[in-house]
Amino acid sequence: MIPRYSRPEMASIWEPQTRFKIWFEIEAHAADALAELGIIPKEAARTIWAKGKDATFDVARIDEIERETKHDVIAFLTHLAEIVGPEARFVHQGMTSSDVLDTCLNVQLKRAADLLIADLDRVLAALKTRAFEHKMTPTIGRSHGIHAEPVTFGLKLAHAHAEFARARARLVAARNEISTCAISGSVGTFAQIDPRVEEHVAKAMGLRPEPVSTQVIPRDRHAMYFATLGVIAASVERLAVEVRHLQRTEVLEAEEFFSEGQKGSSSMPHKRNPVLSENLSGLSRMVRAYVTPALENVVLWHERDISHSSAERMMAPDATVTLDFALVRLAGLIEKLLVYPQNMQKNLDRLGGLVHSQRVLIALTQKGASREDAYKFVQRNAMPVWRGEGDFQTLLKQDADVKKYLTDAEIEEKFDLGYHLKHVDTIFQRVFGES
């Protein structure tokens, strides 16, 4: 997590002061429940809240204590006792460190998911606006990077919209899955603390009680959360790579907005590089890199070990902060994307009509030619055009074998661009629910 790729609202979720505030709330809510159950004095619970709720925790002091205790939760509790006074002896009764750590982590991951869902909504809005703007803007579809058949630029963006809509649904599910609380004691048996305390804390923190925990909340929940972030990052890069390819000089069908005063190269003043898209590729790789440790963290010894802990301290802030930055950058890229319909048409025409070869192939078979012969007739006329030797439609009209089946007018009809776009409305209806 570095400032260059961090946004303040997401980064603040992972700051030490935020973490200690959440730790305090967990402990204080637990004290409330213990007081209601008659296990600790109600006045003690009130004092804990009164002295701790507006406290600014001294991070340097907590770090100083931890250097001696070698235990972060004990260091926090020691500092909290300095703030609360004698009533602090009623804090953390029957609880284990993971009750605080895991519940806090899930609160943070839930808050992070809320921001990421808002980011996705902005991406979706940008994609929808631009998709309808270019709904019928014809462009060439490519497979293997090679010209295939016509599509529209709006369809490209509609495809991305559907992909990010799925991403949003997955993230909502991951947010729900991670929203659990464990206040169950040393090995999850509630031997030293009543399950009703967990229920109270869970409700107060906007979580659900974990049905069964060990000393920790099961890490398959976290694995699914980070796997979801990884899939979203893959979708970010897929769209970023599309922009990078479209911005190539030889293509130039779309490009990133280039602001006044922006410089593309330290040595070549003419350069306009797809730096935002390239940056998104790099950031996406970092988010995906955390999926593997998240999966490996599922495998802990018995009721718990701490092999997951060090990884989570890095991956939780890094993955969420990085994806947050990437999604906002992607939204801005799409909102300001420069689109060049004339270049799209120019590229469509570049192969002299070869993009209509399948229509001719099908027409020949429908008129009686075998598929093998039809393919041969079409391909032998396509290859010279591929080499820049003539026009596809003209060559077909001069081919005796083709003319046995198709008239000139029938050949010409197969070169209608609109034919390829006749179902765009249907696809948009499926994606956006409107035409």
Image (cartoon, rainbow, N blue to C red):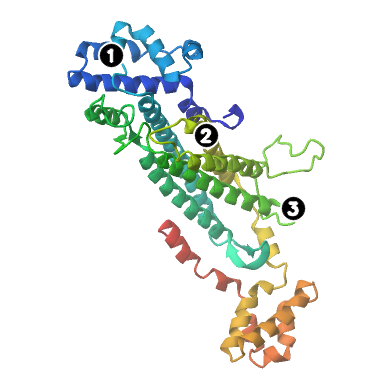
Q: Decide: is 375 above or below 217.
A: below
Q: Earlier in the sequence, mark 2 or mark 3?
A: 3
Hey, which residue is sitting farthest right in the picture?
A: 267
In the image: residue 389, left or right of residue 409? right
Circle 2 sits on which residue? Answer: 315
Q: Secondary structure at mark 1?
A: helix
Q: Earlier in the sequence, mark 3 or mark 1?
A: 1
* Residue that mark 1 sits on: 90
Res 214 label = none
Location of the N terminus (image quadrant): top right
Q: Is residue 23 left or right of residue 151?
A: left
Residue 304 in view (yes/no) = yes
Judge by depth and name the residue closer to the eye, 79 or 244.
79
The answer to whether residue 56 is above or below residue 336 is above
Of the pair 187 and 150, the residue shown nearer to us = 187
- Other residues around mark 1 within 10 Å, as few (<14) / some (14–19) / many (≥20): many
- Three-letter amino acid code at the position of disc 2: Met
Q: CA distance from mark 1 to mark 2?
A: 33 Å
**Placement of the C terminus among the 4 image quadrants:** bottom left
> What residue is shown at x 52% (from left), y 42% (from top)?
291
Q: CA distance from mark 3 to mark 1?
A: 69 Å
Front tag of 3 and 1: 1
Return the residue at label 3. Answer: 249
Horizontal side of 388 relative to 212 (left or right) equals right
Mark 1 or 2: the one toward you: 1
In the picture, measured across the screen, residue 119 lies left or right of residue 396, that is left
Of residue 389 and residue 46, the one placed in the foreground of this image is 46
Q: Position of residue 73 (x, y in %)?
A: 41, 19
